[in-house]
Image (cartoon, helix red, strand yellow):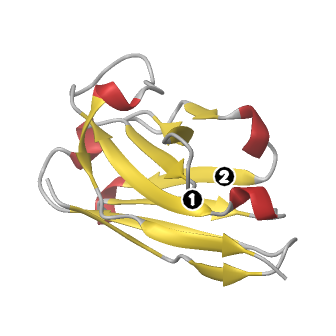
Amino acid sequence: VHLAESGGGLVQPGGSLRLSCAASGRTFSSSAMGWFRQAPGKEREFVAGMDWSGSSTAYVHSVKGRFTVSRDNAKNTMYLQMDSLKPEDTAVYYCAKDKTLLRLALPSKADFYDSWGQGTQVTVSS
């Protein structure tokens, strides 16, 4: 499976961006998907995710109420709508695909994901 993120860029604090993750292959609709981010000098962290059915989502506490994850299985694409952006949201954002098909739970640890995109830079600065 090949994943490709897009939509990153430079935005002022309080602004919005919408990231997209386009997936190739036939297993996208059967896989949980996650968004992770890594800031300079910090470990990669789980940001948000959605299970394969789209019925369950999860967010890291720092983005709850500001970020919204969604997916369109017909288009093999996942999205991350990011509103009220803060300087601390600055990072490279990656999308990833769960290694287990039709998993009941939504994983938040990177070890559960085996396909990763190349990342897209998000910079929040005035």
Residue 9 falls left or right of residue 34:
right
In the image, is residue 81 above or below residue 14? above
Instruction: List the residue tagged with mark 2.
Output: 68
Residue 10, position in %: x, y?
66, 83
Residue at (45%, 70%) from the top-left corner?
120
Q: Depth check: give the residue in front, 59 or 94.
A: 94
Residue at (54%, 30%) from the top-left corner?
56
Find numbered disc 2 in the image and state the secondary structure of the residue it sits on: strand
Where residue 38 is drawn, which disc sits there? none
In the image, is residue 104 above or below residue 120? above
| Amino acid beneath label 2 | Thr
Q: Residues within 10 Å of mark 2 (few under 14, many from 20)?
A: some
Quadrant of the drawing holding the C terminus: bottom right
Location of residue 102 (image quadrant): top left
Find numbered disc 1 in the image and state the secondary structure of the residue it sits on: strand
| Amino acid beneath label 1 | Leu
In the image, is residue 52 above or below residue 73? above
Residue 94 falls left or right of residue 7:
left
Q: Are marks 2 and 1 in contact (CB under 8 Å)?
A: yes
Location of residue 16 (image quadrant): bottom right
Residue at (40%, 35%) from the top-left corner?
53
Count of numbered labels shown in the rendering = 2
Residue 4, position in %: x, y?
30, 68
Residue 97, position in %: x, y?
29, 42
Q: Depth check: give the residue in front, 19 or 70.
A: 19
Residue at (50%, 62%) from the top-left corner?
92
Q: Earlier in the sequence, mark 2 or mark 1?
A: 2
Residue 86 falls left or right of residue 92:
right
Instruction: List the residue tagged with mark 1.
Output: 80
Residue 106 falls left or right of residue 117:
right
Q: Residue furthest front?
A: 41
Q: Depth check: give the residue in front, 41 or 72.
A: 41
